[in-house]
Image (cartoon, grey):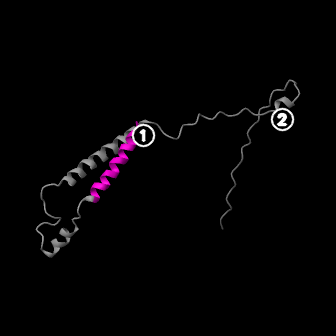
Amino acid sequence: MATLLLIIHLLVCFFLIAVVLLQSGKGAEMGAAFGGSSQTLFGSRGAATFLSKLTTVAAILFMITSFTLAIVTVKGGSVVKKAPSPVAPAPIQGGGVQPSQTPQTPQAPAQQQIPVKQQAPQPAPMK
């Protein structure tokens, strides 16, 4: 569904660009307003032309497809998948030698190692 919606969104986008480019520019009215030859600042407020109505419809469709794509892609999941929580590997006994290479002898229980507390270095006295 997201692919179909994306295709529709792209078609609406290109259609909106084409409709806006087909309209006549209104830059002369704004420039003429400062010279006093026009009655309004941004051009005359006549009836809306077919192209301006088509632009409005295309802009509304563009916004609707944009919002719908945003909602659909968020609910679709993420590209980044959560990795399973890491499990600490068991220590290899025998110095890293493969189990198939060691003789089959009973092993003695491992001795507990007591952690050595290290002291932080003391700063040099200031003079």
- Residue 5 located within the stretch drawn in magenta: yes
Give the mark nearest the N terminus, 2 or 1.
1
- The C terminus sits in image quarter: bottom right
Element assignment for label 1: helix
Which residue is denoted by mark 1 in the rendering?
A: 3
Which residue is denoted by mark 2 in the rendering?
A: 97
Residue 52 lies, with reference to residue 64, above or below; the image says below
- Residue 79 located within the stretch drawn in magenta: no
Q: Residue drawn 12% across and 70% down?
A: 38
Q: Residue drawn 72% across and 47% down?
A: 118
Percent position of residue 36, x then y: 12, 74
Nearest to the observer: residue 23 or residue 92 = 23
Type of amino acid under label 1:
Thr
Pointers 2 and 1 in contact (C-beta within 8 Å): no
Type of amino acid under label 2:
Val
Element assignment for label 2: loop
Percent position of residue 13, x then y: 34, 50
Residue span colored magenta: 1-21
Viewer-nearest of labels 2 and 1?
1
Nearest to the observer: residue 108 or residue 7 = 7
